[in-house]
Amino acid sequence: MRPLFTDIATRKAPSQRRRESTPLRFRKITVADVDKIYDILSRYATAGTCDYTVGGIMMWVDYFNYSFAIVYDTLFIKGVSEENAALTAFSVPVGAMDLRDSVELLRDYCAANRIKLRFSAVPESMLQPLAEAGYSAAEPLADWSDYVYDIDSLATYSGKKYSKKRNHVNRFITDNPEWSVAPLTAENLPAVRDFLVRRHLSADKQESAAYEQRQVMRVLDEYQSYPYEGLVLSVPGRGIVAFGIGEVIGDTVFEHIEKMDHDVAGAGEMMCREFAAMIRERHPEVKYVNREEDAGDPGLRYAKEQLHPVKMLAKYDVTAA
């Protein structure tokens, strides 16, 4: 995997005068900006965290109040801290510029707007480069680490540690011998929308669940505008019982959305397996499945742990020491 930032020796950094003459101008991110954002993210591979994907940005664009600017083929994202929505925070810039130059642009912007320069959701691999640029005070974001899995393991559930998952899949197949999967397309999108509407929101987290429901519906409404790949799981007599949507960047597929009918035994395990199998077949270069954070939800954390991640990608808020 290439580093988050291109080696300065291979790119000509902007001069001091050019940098000072190019102030950052942030604006709200819309679906019309997806192509240009994805172009930069796909060319400058990230440290593997979901925050540097189209889905990771667009699913939470309102929640974290994201806006963006592109200068010298470099993407700047402005939002708020995951830990404190009252604090303005920036993603680590991604693109052709050297980190020191891009940080200098952010310093100028923050000075002009009288705000403190703070980086949020910083991948662990970027702590040292940021420290060298003058930002070394790192605060761990305990609930925002990404869970990353071996794609072969999820596509097969092979091995003793996945015996319970195989049992759930076998139960699903026994109960639904004529099950089927199909790519998510314009043709089956209306049925997927209907399925999403029928699902009940969790009573103990209505606010966050309602926000996510709206965002997922927006993704479905604008599906053709995103670089996504989706899969739909159906059974006779009931129709759709699960669907998943993801995005491939480098050697990782980021599964942004996975929804299932919890009344259908094994639907979730089956969806997880079949989605990984589909991506593995389409993209032999993909080695990992990033199923993103648990956001401090105990039930979600337990479910993610039961899939046996091969690594956790820690994130931090970072400021000047």
Image: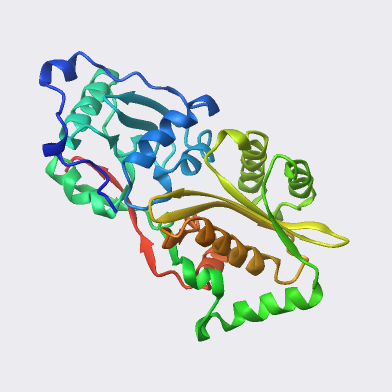
Q: In the drawing, does residue 23 fall left or right of residue 217?
A: left
How far across and how far down the image is residue 102, in percent? 22, 30
Display coloring: rainbow
Give left or right: position of 243 versus 175.
Answer: left
Residue farthest to the top?
21
The residue closer to the viewer here, 14 or 279, is 279
Left or right, 74 with respect to 9, comes to right
| In the depicted structure, whether residue 101 falls above or below residue 194 | above
Nearer to me, 300 or 170: 170
Q: Is residue 114 left or right of residue 176?
A: left
Can see residue 293? yes
Residue extending farthest right: 237
Q: Tell me how many marks there are.
A: 0
**Residue 83 in sight in this render:** no
Q: Position of residue 68 (x, y in %)?
A: 40, 27
Q: Quadrant of the N terminus?
A: bottom left
Give the answer, above or below, for where 277 lies relative to 144: below
Q: Quadrant of residue 115?
A: top left
Q: Nearer the viewer, residue 202 or 252?
A: 252
